[in-house]
Structures are given as C-alpha cells and as structure tokens.
Amino acid sequence: MIRLTAAAAAAAIALGSLPLAASAQQQAASSPGGAARLQLVASFEHQVTGVTVSADGRIFVNFPRWTEDAPISVAEVARDGGLKPYPDDRWNSWRNAKKNQMSAGDHFVCVQSVVADARGNLWVVDPAAPATAPVVQGGPKLVRIDLKTNQVAQVIRFDETVAPQGSYLNDVRFSPDGRHAYLTDAGAKGAIVVVDLQDGRARRVLDGHPSTQPEKDVVVKTDGRELRRPDGRGVEFAADSIALSLDGRVLYWKALTGRTLYRIATDVLADPNMSGKELESRVERVAETEPTDGLWIDRRGRHYLSAIEQDAVKVLDGGRVTTLVEDKRLRWPDTFSEGPDGAVYVTSSRIQDMSWFRPEAGPRLQTQLWRIESNAARQ
C-alpha cells in the first residue's frame, strides 16, 4: 500500500510536476494478478539488471559482475533474443582475473545500468565495484555511445570525491536539455551525483542525508520470509530508484531498503552555489511505499514501481495505486524502459535467488527480459 503525504499535491503544483498525491482517505487499489500479462523478450544465461529501448526500438541490456566474471557487460538484444557485445568486444573484454593487466577507465568493469536518451545516445553507468565490493581504481565512469556510429563518444570518469570506496553508482536520468545527469549511489553511504555533461564536472550531494540512506526498520522479504545471507545480513541498498518528471523539473528517488519516496526541484539540485544545508531543506517526502527497485515515469506521467516482494509491477496514477501485473516468473523486477510504441519493458534480475542468499545456487543465474502486454500500459 502507498500512503501519500498530505501536502504533496500542493507541492507538486509548486514544482510544476504532475501531482502524485491524493487525500489520505484514498485507498490503494489492486487487481489480483494484475490486468496485464508478460511476454518474454529474451532469456539470459547471466544475471541482468538494466534495460533500455532507444527511440528507434533497439534494445540494450547489461550484466553486472556480482557473482561471476560475466563474459559480456553491455549487449544489444537481437530480434531472436541473441546478444551482441556493445559497442564492441574490446569495451566488454574486462575480466576480474586480469584487472592488473587492463585499464579500468577504458573497459566496462561492473556495469549496473544502461539508458538511451532522447538525443541518440546510449549511456552506460559503471560503478566499477565487482560483487559490490571495493571500487576498482580509475573504473567508475559514465560512458556515452553514439547510436548512429556505434562508437564511444564521451567518457566521464569519477574520482574518489564522487565515487569513493564503498560507493555503488546505480542508475541515471538525463535532463531534457541534455545538460545534466543525475545518478543514485546505492552503496554504503547513499547520495545523489549531479553531472554537468558539458564539462564533465560531477558533484556528490545529499551525501549521507536520510533521504538517500536505507531505513533501519525496513526488512526486505521475498517468498514470504526475510531475505538474508547465511550470516544473517539482510538487504541494505541506499538510494536506488530514480525517475525524472516529463518536464525535467523534478527528480524522484528512493532507497531500495526503504519505504519513502522523495523528490527535489532540479533547478535547485543543479545549482552548484546551493549549500548542502540549503539543498537538504528543499528535499520533500512524496509517499510511503514499500521496498522497490525500479522506478519509471511513462509518457502519460504515471509512475511504475517494481514491487520486489510480490513479483509485481504497480502503477501510481493520480493518487491511485493498481497492480499492473503480478507473476511468479517476474522474480525481482529490476529496471524499466519504455519502447517507442509505449510498451513497458522490465528485467527480472532474481536477486533473491543469488548465491549471496542461496549458496547452493552457484554463481551463474538465468534471468529474463519481459515486455508488459497491457492496453493501459500503451495508452
């Protein structure tokens, strides 16, 4: 169930965004099983996280090095479901076993997210922290690939002031004018990273602020039980979910291990002269949700939430929450993207089935990319 803050509607109007909020009396609604169905797009022999669909319908996915030295980091998905390393074999040739022989700045080390923008580019987020462990020196970066030439056009490298040890850059959104990128850091100390794409300068903001940290009273549950490692550790991911309003004026984010959805005006966030205290004072609570991973705002302004505890995708629209699809095959819905026809795609990363939590599972994990078939999703 999602509880919307009483003042959120007025705040949404002030920020120029589509209002998320409604009165406290409105109840979250759901339809058992959801009104949509899943169509399998591709199955993978390795653990997928990110997906993105370009304006011309090309599909890209990525595979982080969490439990195995995956042979491909970024791939284009062919019509038959096959994978082609993207942009080429060299960028995908990193191997953990050879890290002392390779340049981390010129290879994909541990890619967490891929996002196609509206300007013909594919952006790759590389936190460079295999197994979400120590960051490989010189590895954290944001890579821009020109989708026309299929060549790397820009590499923005992050030093330790932006991606310190313990960080794990997670996902990214881009301002409509192409000037700024906003990233979440889901690592040991959550934060938002603001990047000026013109000069490559990056700033780490809301570093350690409550809005970017896991909530201590939240325990992620899957399959009806608490999700824990053999030593008792639970799931603790900081700022993870991220979305940008259609007009680019409001950024939303949320810790995976948390219930509270937050937002801030991007003109404030992008102002380098804004002090840390001033910035913190402009953060707003939007809603109380549940543990979620992916967050997406579609072309109609509806918010898609990945309900990781329920194998489901929910939609928040005009203050009403509905279950779009609930399916046991959708284990840990991870990342969303929207195709040119309005169809929504989602990856199933099966985090609860990883060897982190089930040692008997082994390092390799089969995962899937799904397309949500729904008239409501494509209107």
Image (tube, rainbow, N blue to C red):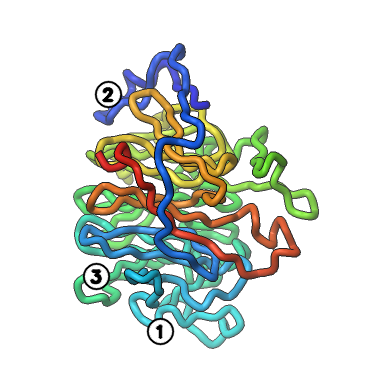
Query: Within the image, what quadrant is residue 58 found in?
Result: bottom left
Alpha carbon distance from label 2 to label 1? 48 Å
Q: Secondary structure at mark 3?
A: strand
Other-residue count near label 2 (Cα within 10 Å), few / some / many at <14 / 14–19 / ≥20 = few
Query: Within the image, what quadrant is residue 36 found in?
Result: top left
The spot of residue 297 in percent (x, y) is: 33, 41
Amino acid type of the residue that numbered disc 3 sits on in the rendered structure:
Asp
Circle 3 is placed at which residue position?
146
Alpha carbon distance from label 1 to label 3? 16 Å
Circle 1 is placed at which residue position?
90
Q: Secondary structure at mark 2?
A: helix
**Is label 2 in contact with label 3 (beta carbons under 8 Å)?**
no
Question: Residue placed at 34% from the left, 48% from the top?
Answer: 344
Question: Residue placed at 31% from the left, 58% from the top?
Answer: 53
Question: Residue placed at 42% from the left, 45% from the top?
Answer: 37
Circle 2 is placed at which residue position?
14
Q: Earlier in the sequence, mark 2 or mark 3?
A: 2
